[in-house]
């Protein structure tokens, strides 16, 4: 489904991603862990073409989406993205936020897109917020709306970039529940997170990024319980000291 | 068990009441003292009698009022037409200047040059150049009406200001908003139209209204071209009677016209500020 082949990316002389190769199969969930600045966000932003890459390729269903002349807007419309800062549109209410892309990008009618949006909102207990503006919602509600906004168009892949980092523990739980439900429905996802317990629960595979390279990859229990590299051991040790593991 | 305010609370409330009574008293005394002082200074001035006769004559105010009022209708029409075009052109200039499309490079360049020139030129000079220069070209389709030429001058000058105000609004929208739009698959143009511009315009409404108030006042400057607006009408009456009261009448009418707009702008600004404080963005 999504194949990343020897990806390389630098900002000036700063090499932020090197020799990244990852294959994401349909319905698979891969979780990226690693310290801030290890390249998790850059990798996700490269996949939805918000960042240009220097070398390598990214294939979506076999099509090279990093090739010259590819319609980036058309590619992005098939990939869902959710960010740490929610980035809901403050001038639109919840329903309008969710239906903007279906209507303007996918040409779905207003009434049909609103029906679908209300259906999603009901399922995830947010129906009473449909007409509210984002600034009246809690952070957890905002982030859940942002996730629904990304999945309503049925993207091939959903990219989640530290979506709980701006939330307190109770709000984190409600967001993670929603993501777990998406997994049980078979959503293909690539998730960058600092929540190790969550990584353990949803990940089919965990990738440890360090200074722009994938140092270790494996099942959650392998990575979290039997780290091999000194870098991963140090990272997990620091998490443990901070009370986050 | 019902809540009984503690003596501490009663004491605190009494102190607050005392403080606010004190503030009100001080405000009243201060107003009376300054008001009295101003009255004494003005009415005690050696030329006060002469000024009162030539600027505050009820007789001349009454006789000039109909002329000035009918002139004011010209100002109002100029304001409506100029205001509409200024908003349209200002928006186009702002969009051109913030676009990144290579096709629009020449438009971007022209807008930048235009803005530089017309923000720098005094309005009076633009009025004189357009009002006397354009008809001088002798081109048949160029209008010769001074009111139209005056309106064109106002549009030229104010579009440059308003364009900059809207551009500032566009640039003040968090770039993450545009990025979120693009991530949903919206094109550059769609992101601008549905995500950035609505937020930008909300931000600059008070500033735009401020420019509109200023335009309302400056519509009086078209009188230098000979258009018989409120100021010109007052000038004609003054020339006949050698009494300056008609100017005061015109001034009072202009102020009366701007007060609703200024109050509305203040109200809108306060409401936005309150919303920001509530969201903790201060």
Image (spheres, helix red, strand yellow):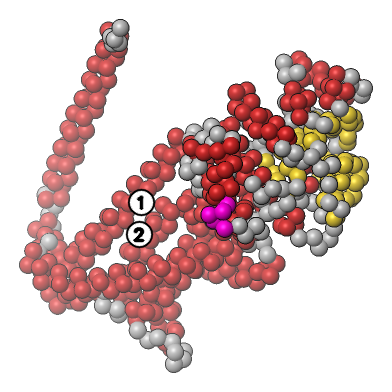
Q: Give the chain letter at badge 1.
A: B
Residue at point 53%, 54% (across, down): A111
Earlier in the chain: of badge 2 and badge 1, it is 2
Q: Which mark is residue B213?
A: 2
Residue at point 76%, 45% (across, down): A157
Splitting the image into 4 quarters, where does residue B96 fall? bottom right
Q: Give the chain letter at badge 2.
A: B
Q: Secondary structure at mark 1?
A: helix
Q: Nearer the viewer, residue B222 or B17?
A: B17
Q: Which mark is residue B236?
A: none
Q: Position of residue B7 (x, y in %)?
A: 27, 7
Q: Position of residue A28 (x, y in %)?
A: 81, 38
Q: Nearer the viewer, residue A83 or A172?
A: A172
The crowd level at tag 2 (other Cα within 10 Å; few <14, some 14-19, many 20+) is many
Magenta region's main secondary structure? Answer: helix
Indicate whether B241 appears above or below B278: below
Whether residue A227 appears in magenta in the rendering, the answer is no
Residue farthest to the left, as pictured:
B59
Whether residue A111 appears in magenta in the rendering, the answer is yes
Q: Are marks 2 and 1 in contact (CB under 8 Å)?
A: yes
| Magenta stretch, residue numbers | A109-113
| Discs 2 and 1 lie in a common subunit | yes
**Closer mark to the observer between disc 2 and disc 1:** 1
Residue at point 16%, 42% (across, down): B35
Splitting the image into 4 quarters, where does residue A174 fall? top right
Indicate whether B138 appears above or below B73: below
Q: Which mark is residue B265?
A: 1
Q: Position of residue B238 (x, y in %)?
A: 17, 73
Residue at point 58%, 48% (across, down): A116
Q: Does residue A2 appear to the left or right of A126 in the view shown?
A: right
Q: Position of residue A221 (x, y in %)?
A: 85, 22
């Amino acid at each position: 489904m999504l194949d990343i082949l020897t990806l390389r990316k630098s900002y000036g002389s700063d090499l932020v991603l090197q020799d990244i190769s990852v294959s994401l199969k349909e319905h698979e969930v891969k979780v990226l862990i690693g310290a801030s600045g290890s390249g998790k966000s850059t990798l996700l932003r490269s996949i939805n073409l918000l960042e240009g890459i220097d070398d390598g390729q990214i294939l979506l269903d076999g099509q090279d989406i990093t090739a010259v002349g590819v319609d980036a807007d058309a590619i992005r419309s098939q990939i869902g993205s959710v960010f740490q800062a929610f980035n809901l549109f403050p001038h639109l209410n919840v329903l309008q936020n969710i239906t903007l892309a279906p209507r303007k990008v996918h040409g779905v009618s207003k009434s049909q897109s609103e029906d679908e949006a209300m259906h999603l909102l009901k399922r995830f207990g947010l129906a009473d917020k449909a007409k509210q503006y984002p600034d009246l919602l809690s952070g957890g509600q905002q982030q859940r709306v942002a996730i629904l906004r990304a999945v309503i168009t049925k993207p091939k892949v959903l990219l989640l970039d530290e979506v709980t980092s701006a939330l307190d523990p109770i709000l984190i739980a409600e967001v993670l529940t929603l993501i777990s439900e998406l997994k049980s429905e078979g959503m293909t996802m690539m998730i960058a997170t600092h929540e190790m317990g969550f990584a353990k629960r949803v990940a089919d595979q965990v990738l440890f990024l360090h200074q722009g390279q994938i140092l270790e990859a494996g099942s959650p229990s392998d990575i979290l319980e039997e780290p091999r590299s000194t870098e991963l051991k140090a990272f997990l040790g620091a998490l443990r000291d901070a009370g986050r593991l | 068990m019902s809540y009984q305010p503690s003596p501490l609370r009663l004491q605190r409330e009494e102190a607050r009441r005392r403080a606010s009574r004190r503030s009100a008293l001080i405000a009243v005394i201060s107003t009376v003292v300054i008001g009295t002082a101003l009255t004494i200074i003005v009415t005690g001035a050696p030329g006060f009698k002469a000024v009162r006769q030539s600027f505050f004559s009820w007789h001349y105010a009454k006789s000039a009022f109909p002329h000035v009022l009918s002139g004011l209708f010209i100002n109002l029409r100029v304001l409506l037409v100029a205001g509409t075009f200024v908003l349209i052109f200002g928006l186009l200039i702002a969009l051109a200047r913030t676009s990144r499309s290579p096709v629009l490079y020449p438009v971007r360049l022209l807008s930048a040059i235009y803005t530089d020139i017309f923000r720098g030129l005094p309005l009076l000079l633009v009025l004189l150049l357009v009002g006397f220069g354009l008809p001088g070209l002798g081109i048949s389709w160029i209008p010769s009406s001074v009111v139209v030429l005056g309106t064109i001058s106002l549009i030229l000058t104010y579009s440059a200001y308003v364009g900059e105000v809207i551009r500032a609004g566009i640039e003040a929208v968090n770039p993450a908003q545009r990025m979120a739009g693009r991530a949903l698959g919206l094109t550059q143009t769609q992101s601008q139209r549905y995500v950035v511009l609505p937020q930008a315009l909300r931000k600059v409404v008070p500033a735009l209204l401020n420019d509109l108030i200023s335009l309302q006042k400056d519509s009086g400057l078209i009188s230098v071209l000979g258009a018989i607006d409120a100021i010109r009408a007052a000038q004609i009456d003054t020339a006949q009677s050698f009494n300056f009261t008609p100017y005061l009448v015109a001034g009072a009418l202009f102020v009366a016209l701007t007060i609703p707009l200024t109050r509305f702008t203040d109200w809108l600004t306060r409401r936005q500020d309150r919303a920001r404080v509530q969201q903790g963005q201060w």
